[in-house]
Amino acid sequence: MFSFFKKKEKGEEKAPKNLKLIALCLAFEVANADNDIDVRERDLILEKIKESIDLSILTEKEIFEVIQEESEKRVSFYDIINDINQNLDKKEKIDVLKMLWEIAYADKVLDVDEERIIRRSAEMLGIKPSIVLQTKEEFKNQ
């Protein structure tokens, strides 16, 4: 499903940068939860793409379009969660959670559906509700 983002089998480090892109797919789902990706949310996702990968193959806008196309085809984001669960440790999962809150609050409005996706994702990632609330508070008043 995410063949573009999948890690290579041989000689690959434990947590390849491609997992950051898989996490960005989840962030895209949060931004798109209200069916309206605000320009601030989009710009933040583009910035995160720049930070996450080598842009010598595709530009951040082309990668954003790939993420968008995958989202339109996807019925569930279980594959994203599964990849994250199999490849990231607790601290890295919390970093993903922080990125989700950052994206959700980029437009200064937390939509009910955005919060629902974040909370469900955190639950599926095995992150305690107290940590979910702590990380939410970090971005709530920024």
Image: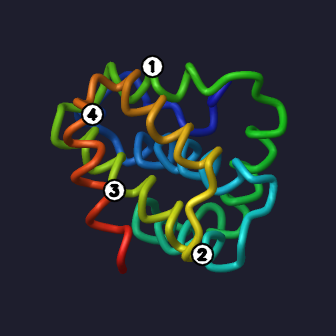
- x, y percentage for residue 124? 40, 21
In the structure shown, which secondary structural element does the residue marked by tag 4 occupy? helix
The numbered mark, 4 or 3, whose residue comes first in the sequence reads: 4
Tag 4 residue: 129
Residue 82 numbered tag: 1
Name the amino acid type tagged 4.
Pro
In the rendered structure, the answer to whether residue 4 lies left or right of residue 69 reads left
Tag 2 near tag 4, CB within 8 Å? no
In the structure shown, which secondary structural element does the residue marked by tag 1 occupy? helix
Tag 2 residue: 107
The numbered mark, 2 or 4, whose residue comes first in the sequence reads: 2
**62 or 27: which is nearer to us?**
27
In the structure shown, which secondary structural element does the residue marked by tag 3 occupy? helix
- x, y percentage for residue 101? 42, 57
The numbered mark, 2 or 1, whose residue comes first in the sequence reads: 1
The numbered mark, 4 or 1, whose residue comes first in the sequence reads: 1
